[in-house]
Image (cartoon, rainbow, N blue to C red):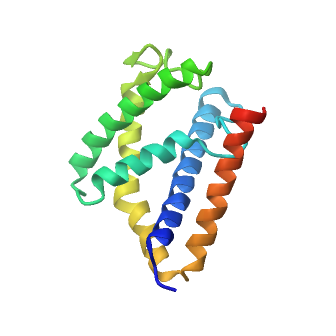
Amino acid sequence: MQRNRFTWVCSYLLEFTVCAFVGWLYEVVLEWIVYRDYIDRGLLPLPVCPIYGFGAMALLLLFRRDHRWWVVLLGSTVLTTVLELAASYLLERMGLRLWDYSAWPMQFEGRISVLSSLVFGVLALALVGGVHPLLRRFYEKAPVWLPCTLGIACGLLLAGGSVYVFFLK
């Protein structure tokens, strides 16, 4: 079977899910360090934070060809800050407040923080320079059905979790 657009869409669905899981893991570990307690930071009934997946896909679109570390770091820091700020307002309109940086230094309305923005910039460097190229090599070497199956499964899980949270809960 030839690799086609469907295969690449499936691979990006899988990558979206991996990044959303890593974001969830980062959030849970941060809560454990700060509060010494497990706090599930996910919006969906899955161990994922979709905002990390959306942010990662936006970063890959912008920086997939430009790997200069300082461009990725600065650009991703600005982009993720804007995304986080916009998401906070959108979620607030839905009656949700999923994070609060009020106690952090150099923050704005508890919605964004310079420190968290820099962490996101460093995570973006790891994504663009390491994780994404590694996953691309995996996709190229794996049988075509594997990324397709995994991507479809991830897409169905994310869609099911979203339907549950926004329509059935």
Residue appearing at x 34%, y 59% in the figure: 129
- The answer to whether residue 39 is visible is no
Residue 132 left/right relative to 53: left
Q: 131 or 9, which lies in front?
A: 9
Furthest-right residue in view?
Answer: 169
Task: Check the image and report above or below for 138 versus 14.
Answer: below
The x and y percentages for residue 16 are 52, 54
The x and y percentages for residue 159 are 65, 48
Furthest-bottom residue in view?
Answer: 1
Residue 62 left/right relative to 90: left
Indicate the quadrant containing the C terminus: top left, top right, bottom left or bottom right.
Answer: top right
Q: 75 or 150, which lies in front?
A: 150
The x and y percentages for residue 30 are 57, 35
Count the marks: 0
Residue 154 left/right relative to 90: right
Residue appearing at x 68%, y 31% in the figure: 36
- The answer to whether residue 147 is visible is yes
The x and y percentages for residue 139 are 48, 74
Residue appearing at x 48%, y 60% in the figure: 12
